[in-house]
Image (tube, helix red, strand yellow):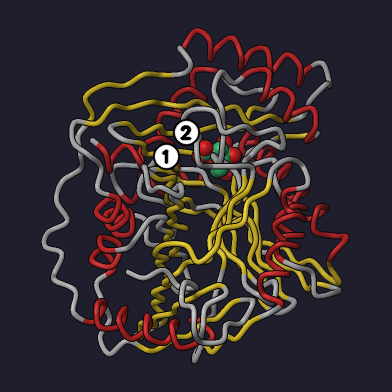
Amino acid sequence: MEPLGSEKAAPRTRGLVSRATKLSTVPDRRAVLSVADSPRTFWSAPGEATVIGSGSATTIRADGPDRFRAIREAATELFSVGDVHAGALAARPRLFGGFAFHDEHTETAPWEGYPGAKFVLPRTQVTYAGEEAWLTVNGIGATPGAVERRLEEAADQFETLPDPGSVGTPPGIAGRTRTTSEAEWRESVVAATDRIAAGELRKVVLAQALRTSLERPLSMPATLTRLERRYPDCYRFLIEPDDGSGGFFGATPERLVGRSGRTVETGALAGTTGRGDTPEEDEWLAAELLADEKNVHEHELVADAVRSQLAPYAASVRTGERSIRRLATVQHIETPITAELTDDEHVLDLVEALHPTPAVGGLPPTEALRTIRDTEPFERGWYAAPVGWFDAAGYGSFAVAIRSALARGPTATLFAGVGIVEDSDPDREWDEVQLKYRPILDELE
Ligand SMILES: C=C(O[C@H]1C=CC=C(C(=O)O)[C@@H]1O)C(=O)O
């Protein structure tokens, strides 16, 4: 297909041209993902429109500690010159992407194609909003005529997609390699709890990675469909490298921050137990978790930090009730936190202020990050970092990329971590890590 922006004769705008139309049928998401061009993006979150991005009209990247500001500035410039007719709010152009966990991130294996920050403006965007589906085509430096023609072609394509058939079975796992042995894990947890006891640290989240080799190629559309069925109230995402060689994906229960108008929604999610075999056992485990001092302490450190990191931007901060978040494989303690902003703060400023929460980093932050760097024998890359989207107004929604994996060729690398506090027991924490691999592992095995 002719790349937008290549037309010679008609006048072009220097900036973004975006056109949208309502599709006459609602296409199957798996069918759309299957025909989408690389890099594909996928975002599906509770209470939000689901968006599938196909190809890139433009991609912005940044590295280092300044990456949040650099992305915001590049996006402001991108959105400043535009000819945008969205037709519906849901169909407006948005940038999808994420950030590396650490400021000092390099694209070493397996993270090639994932810089310190990367956001894609999809060339074609299919948005599922309520009962409707919208199609948006974005072009940079293109003529409106070229964008409109591409919109017509793409609408024809998405309105007549073939039935994708059955979702099929997971690829199967041929082999597994752990980054951390049980003995090494015990040693690092004991070292961390000793430092906490000595007052050098209050909490640190230590993670592991699990490299799996797959029996058959992983189908991303099928995997995301299965995750949607099992984790409908989680934030499900996919960000592909430019050449589409694999993808970083997941189904995370943890919202980092959402901003709409001056209202900000965030929360604390930390403290974990398993699922029971019966509803009574589930209730019993949940009650035990809410009464467990170690888990409540671990949770409250997160809630306090989120409130104080938001405070400089907020006219008011409200804390909801502490409750249990029950997922297919684990249960967590959750506290919703909302705030009203004093100013029209860009969502990326809030992302920068909140990342990393002590649910994935620790306290004090600098000490915890140094401990993570010194302890973990693998690159976190984009694991446990912000993923999501934002628009021209600085509104957006970001999740914390846990319960995630990086697929690449015949392999998938899974990541999972746990909060370590003074009375953490290394063996229990090991078991908790294994439990947190389950959401992704279940879709591979
Ligand atoms: C760091 C992870 O989980 C965090 C989120 C919820 C509960 C957590 C916990 O109880 O330790 C972790 O802080 C992960 O799943 O990789």
Report the residue marked by disc 1: 405
Q: Secondary structure at mark 1?
A: strand
Q: Secondary structure at mark 2?
A: strand
Q: Quadrant of the image for the C terminus? A: top left
The residue lying at 12 percent from left, 59 percent from top is 166
Q: Nearer the viewer, residue 81 or 191?
A: 81
The residue lying at 24 percent from left, 31 percent from top is 214
The residue lying at 84 percent from left, 64 percent from top is 313
- The amino acid type of the residue labelled 2 equals Phe
Mark 1 nearby-residue class (10 Å; few <14, some 14–19, many ≥20): many
The image shows residue 79, relative to residue 257, as above or below, that is below
Mark 2 nearby-residue class (10 Å; few <14, some 14–19, many ≥20): many
| Residue 199 falls in image quadrant | top right
- The amino acid type of the residue labelled 1 equals Ala
| Residue 271 falls in image quadrant | top right
The image shows residue 145, relative to residue 325, as above or below, that is below
Indicate yes or no: mark 2 CB to ligand 1 under 8 Å. yes
